[in-house]
Image: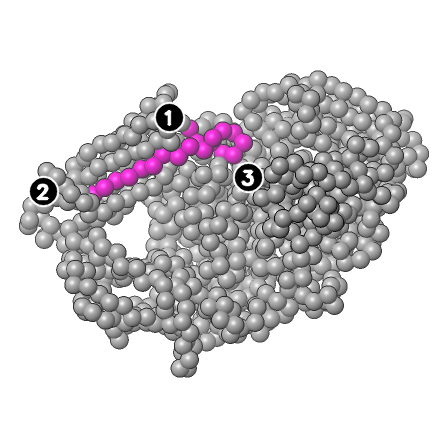
Amino acid sequence: MQKYLLDGEWHLREAGTDKELSVMIPGSVLEAYTKAGLLPDPYYGENEKNITSLFEKEFEYRRSFTVAEELLAEDTVDLVCLGLDTLGDIILNGQKIASVNNMHRAWRFGVKSLLKKGENEIMIRFHSPNAFIRQAFENGNITYVNLGNMAGSGYLRKAHSQFGWDWGPQLPDVGIWRSIFLEASGTARIGDVYITQKHEKGRVDLRLKVRIDTPDRRHFWAEDRRLCGRIRISPPSGSLIEQQVDLDLDENTFSITIENPQLWWPNGLGAHPLYGVELELLSPGSEDPGSPLDIYRCKIGLRTMTISTEADQWGREFALMVNGLKVFSMGADYIPEDSIIPRVNADRTRKLLEDCVKANFNTIRVWGGGYYPDDFFYDLCDELGLVVWQDLMFACNIYVFTEDFTANVAEEVRQNIRRIRHHASLGLWCGNNEMEVAWVDWETVRDHPKAVKADYIKLFEVLLPQLARETDPNTFYWLASPSSGGSFDEPNADDRGDVHYWEVWHGLKSFAEYRKHYFRYCSEFGFEALPELDTIASFSAPEDHNLFSPVMEAHQKCPSGNGKILYYISETYRYPKDFASLVYISQILQMESIQYGVEHWRRYRGRCMGAIYWQLNDCWPVISWASIDYYGRWKALHYGARRFFAPLMVSIFNEVKNIRLFTHNETPEAVNGLVRLTLRDRDFRALASDEVQVGIPALSAAEVFARDYAELVNTAELERSVFVEAELLIDRRVVSRQTAFFAAPKAFSFKRPRYTLDLIETGDAFVIRLKADTFCRFVQLKISGEDVVFQDNYFDIVNSEGREILVLKSDLKDSYTAETLKGKVEILSVGDTY
Ligand code: BMA
């Protein structure tokens, strides 16, 4: 097999013009135009509005390449395009070879007869996605348009969110977004490999189903060629397992036993060892097979993984099961990392996913309105122990089941399942985002003809599950998110399946509403906040820093979103005195909201088995539900997640003055600890204190202590000036702490804090010692000019000792002395914001 890469330098021009730009492929128009300075930053100010119409135009990509004789000597030469976005005509040496219309799939065309030795030219002409969806919408009978989206996006297999979303800009970029190459082969190649595992005591039996393809069967048999192969399994430690095999054309099955398997576990439950698998297809008919004709390589993790939907006393559970253990899923929903997709790369994704691990995630849901991530995304999830809930790429849209559409999505889904299915981290496939619930609950969708509703069933309950059964029968398949198991049977029911819960935020209900629901698995719930000031500064000038300025509104895609933020502030906090305080208050509210839900559902572990908040990341700098913004900066919520997803945690359930404490253990080991509850006033005086020894079983949540403070906290003044602090200590070290009030924070009489800051240099780190003269709620530390992820942030100061926070020098861009760094530290807490 020979591969000739066509990535690299191409020429790009707007169709009908002469001016060409030299560009790099993989790439896109937006990426190339912004890099070349031909367009202003689409993310700045209100620029987006003027750039959407760029994609009314057609664009041409062109390059020449040299073909050597050896390439043409092979039996076949294919042009392989791993990603074309989206509507394109491919022209090779002046002849059109194909029209493409799906960015989610790869394309392969036999091109040998069109190639010539020496100089060749390829051109791809991209048509306007805007014009296509507009016409399709006008000609079709679908009237539904999702919030923020351009009408008709459901007619085109292009990431829906590129047409705008309630967090994303309308920038339907165009380009050759994944690798493109020629692949030449003679004799035979590895067509497909599917690996399944059977776990027995002390061993795992691997089964490899291998399909061998040949370009020309007659030619193959005429020469009486025989094939063989070599399978190698490289364990994370220990010796290589190698096996020689005979191979036939078409299907082959092999078994390999791995003794003493090292099991793969999600983050928090164990290690994530990976086994390398390699299959070499060797030259036929020779004792010494020489160099392989083709090689397949992947990494697998040894584990069993499924979702248990057993009936129980509450309905039906929805629980991730790994190696026989039921795991409480903790994580967030993942959306595309950039509206200009070629800007996404393995380093950026690694940082984002490592930040998930830092916040104790064990799960990530790839939401269905974007695109199927690159291989490196799944490699990283394998390595980091993040279980992937993988939606198929359908979201908040109505799809018409024509023959072409069906064949196109069937191929797309088959290809992506094949590409992803071997990954250790793959937890489940899910048919779509919110389409079943839309048919039941959303008037704007329900109004459509019955035939279109029937198409939903044909696509999502017949075709796609059947494809998944054929292509990856070993991975759990869920019909939609949310769903109760299909057939439009109360898709968002509390007592079975998964739930998207939006009464808090979209429905303006209070956080306390979470406690009325004992969902089995909450796969979406969320709350918006502004991003960091530095991020806001990247798209606006200081005069725009007013929540209702045109620029801030252009960076808020949720209808009435900024009003909702202010409404929730009015319910909880005092009116922030300036823009910086508004940013900060919006973030701590977001953190508190999600914490409220997660802690509640963790308390009912067993009944509820998952809390996946909306959303992890952003695709541009924007006001949104994300916990990490476009530039990778953590909002308060992400620090909160680190605490409320902590495997060992204490949580406070407060009902008026009754404080109930729960311990949580999401590890497979039982631990012993001490729980301490202290009532304090603003001047750090302890007014009452209790301690209990606790044994915390593995994978558990339980109430361990309760105390009613009604007698002690018996005046309005006390209610507004005392608080309780709960701590969980293991081996005398505090592993979790929480604070609760007896009045709303806006009623609490915070004193304006005076901080004392000390910085100490210790080898490769600085220690920030922060003290205050009064109780401080949610202290935010910042180092101006730096993007540091602190060991802890948005923490309380509850005693005169204050807190010590470590900053690693390797996390700082510049070098400092303790003194110069001290000058850069900024401190803010609730008492400073009004
Ligand atoms: C959910 C998601 C998204 C949306 C989010 C916030 O329902 O599936 O479609 O962005 O809500 O509204």
Rounded to the nearest angstrom, the CA distance separating label 2 from label 1 is: 35 Å
Identify the residue position indicated by label 1 in the image.
261
| Ligand 1 has an atom within 8 Å of the beta carbon of the residue at disc 1 | no
Q: Which residues are magenta?
A: 263-281
Task: Please tell me whether mark 1 sits on a helix, a strand or a loop.
Answer: loop
Task: Please tell me whether mark 2 sits on a helix, a strand or a loop.
Answer: loop
- Where 607 falls versus 344 (above or below)? above
Q: Is residue 645 left or right of residue 354?
A: right
Identify the residue position indicated by label 3 in the image.
357
- Residue type, mark 3 in image: Val
The numbered mark at residue 611 is none
- Residue type, mark 1 in image: Pro
Instruction: Name the foreground residue: 81 vs 536.
Output: 536
Rounded to the nearest angstrom, the CA distance separating label 3 from label 2 is: 50 Å
Quarter assignment of residue 12: bottom left
In reply to whether residue 302 is colored magenta, the answer given is no
Magenta-highlighted stretch: main secondary structure?
Answer: loop
Q: Residue 37, how many percent across, how many down?
A: 52, 72
